[in-house]
Image: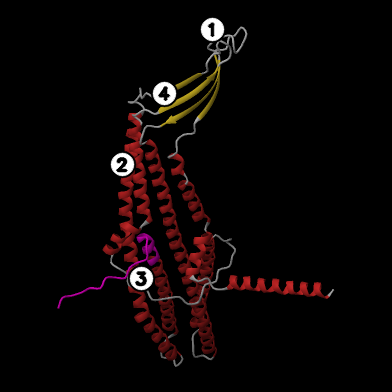
Amino acid sequence: MKNPIKNFVFALLLASLLTQTAQAETDAPLQLEQAVAHALASNPGLAARQSRAEALAAVPEQVSTLPDPTLSLNALSFPTDTFSVSQEAMTQKQIGIGLTLPFPGKLGLREQVADSEAQAAGQDVLEQSQLLERNVRSAWWNLFYIDRALDIVLHNQAWLRQLNSIAETRYSTGLGMQSDVLLAQVELSKLLEMELSLRESRRNMAARMNALLGRKGVTEITLPAQASEDLPPVADDSQLIELAQSTRPLLATRRKLLEAAQARTHLAEKDYYPDFKLGLAYGFRSGNNPNGSARADLASVTLGISLPLFAGSRQGQAVAQRQAEWQQQDYELQDSILQVTAQIEQALAAYQSAREQAALFKGGLIPQSQQTVSAMRAAYQVNKVDFLNLVRAQITLYNYETQYWKTISNGWQALANLQAAVGAPLPAPKENTHEQ
């Protein structure tokens, strides 16, 4: 009895340990790179694109293979009065095989079309994975900003409660005014309303993040309390636009689709030329010839050729259609190039603006406001500053701190947009060299 009991206890301890480990992993802060890796591995939309690419990758070999031959079993020239196999000399039981032979070059063009489309689908997977990474980074930084804004709101609520207590004490002793107490309560109510709004925004953003990660919307998301505030310098727009021409998967997709459209056009032109049908048959005969010899079996060879008699209304229109589709793909490529250029310029402008604003908030406005609030709070306690100005100074500091984290969040999101627009890790800016 001892061994089963020990085994049972051990199993319970092991299950408890595994549960605690899984819970610890769930409760651990979700790091940014961890979120990106999880999304790339678990997002169902990206998995669907990958499955589509795999399906298209199996097409080129299929379309470049000759059609399956056909086997025929025939009964020829049976007399209807007796249905005898030996009565008539032409009666025969026949077995045959037929094969369709496309005009030379058609199979190669079909393979080229399918291969270009498969490569386009593969590039589309890369494009969607980069867009997914961009969306995850954007959602993560939005969540991070909301968390910092909530921290600032809660800190200011505590500060206002403390200030309200001071105002009530001063009013009760005749040193302050009732309007100070009422003003503190009004500002505290505003912060409570702001807290409710931020918590609602966080729930919505957490649901979006869970969807990107391929998880249930009710999964709790906890972020670390700190993240990098240093927005690095990046290359200029001309360098990034030039890089995007060779690295952006969207443009590679468009080029492959253009190649496929071009091959379709050549294939349509090939339809002016006939396909061939080759047939081989062997007929078994029964009975004897008039001279008493056995009737010989018969062998047959057939060659069929398709005749493009309606080339003007069929092949000609097909070529016109494919040429228009080719032109469409070329226009879409040019349009995508313009869109990528605009995306890079817009994202770079937003990033540079955020970088400059963050430096202004951190290096000037926030420290100055903190000093102002500290000085005015000390002056208020000795009746040298009125309550309203003190509250205004604290609200200004609150706004600057909130805007700073919003700017940091916007900057990292703009950087994610910029990297997705380029389609590759961003290079460092080129060093300027000046001749002495």
Q: Is residue 358 left or right of residue 205?
A: left
Residue 231 visible? yes
Q: Residue at label 4? A: 304
Above or below, 174 relative to 277 = below
Q: Residue at label 3? A: 354
Mark 3 vs mark 2: give the one in front.
Answer: 2
Q: In which quarter of the image is residue 272?
A: top left
Whole-number angstrom distance, CA of label 4 to CA of label 1: 37 Å
Q: Main SS type for the magenta part?
A: loop
**Which secondary structure, mark 2?**
helix
Q: Could you tell me which quadrant the C terminus lies in?
A: bottom left
**What stretch of residues is rendered in magenta?**
415-436
* Crowdedness near tag 2: few (<14), some (14–19) or many (≥20) residues, C-alpha within 10 Å: some
Mark 3 vs mark 4: give the one in front.
Answer: 4
**Which secondary structure, mark 1?**
loop
Q: Earlier in the sequence, mark 4 or mark 1?
A: 1
Name the disc covering residue 89, or none.
none
**Which secondary structure, mark 4?**
strand
Whole-number angstrom distance, CA of label 2 to CA of label 4: 36 Å
Foreground pick, 315 / 75: 75
Mark 1 vs mark 3: give the one in front.
Answer: 1
Mark 4 vs mark 1: give the one in front.
Answer: 1
- Total labels: the figure holds 4
Q: Do the residues labelled 2 and 4 touch (CB within 8 Å)?
A: no
Whole-number angstrom distance, CA of label 1 to CA of label 2: 72 Å
Give the residue type at disc 1.
Asn
Give the residue type at disc 2.
Gln
Foreground pick, 311 / 334: 311
Q: Quadrant of residue 23?
A: bottom right
Q: Is residue 216 left or right of residue 323?
A: right
